[in-house]
Amino acid sequence: MDKTDQRILKILKENAKCSLKEIGSIVHKSGQAVGIRIKKIRRPTNH
């Protein structure tokens, strides 16, 4: 998890209803890129 992922999580913790587009504008990524990052964060690891 990098700093951008951490920023995304922080934003979601503060306001879970924030749209992907809104989050993307804050972290300077597209809404689609934010959605992909969130899916990767949510994916369980097998370690």
Image (cartoon, grey):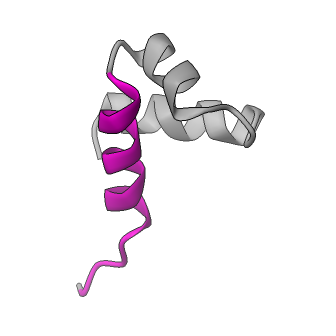
Q: Is residue 17 left or right of residue 44?
A: right
- Quadrant assignment for the C terminus: bottom left
Q: Which residues are magenta?
A: 30-46
Residue 6 lies within the magenta run: no
- The answer to whether 45 is drawn above or below residue 31 in the figure is below
Residue at (25, 87) in percent of width and height: 46
Residue at (35, 12) in percent of width and height: 28
Residue at (76, 34) in percent of width and height: 15
Q: Is residue 40 left or right of residue 10?
A: left
- The answer to whether 29 is drawn above or below residue 28 in the figure is below
Q: Quadrant of residue 5?
A: top left
Residue furthest to the left: 47
Query: Percent from the top left, x then y, of residue 29?
Result: 32, 20
Count the marks: 0
Query: Percent from the top left, x then y, of residue 21?
Result: 50, 24
Residue at (31, 59) in percent of width and height: 40
Query: Percent from the top left, x then y, of residue 31?
Result: 41, 29
Q: Quadrant of residue 45?
A: bottom left
By secondary structure, the bulk of the magenta-drawn segment is best described as helix
The residue lying toward the viewer, choosing from 17 and 46, is 17
Q: Quadrant of residue 39?
A: bottom left
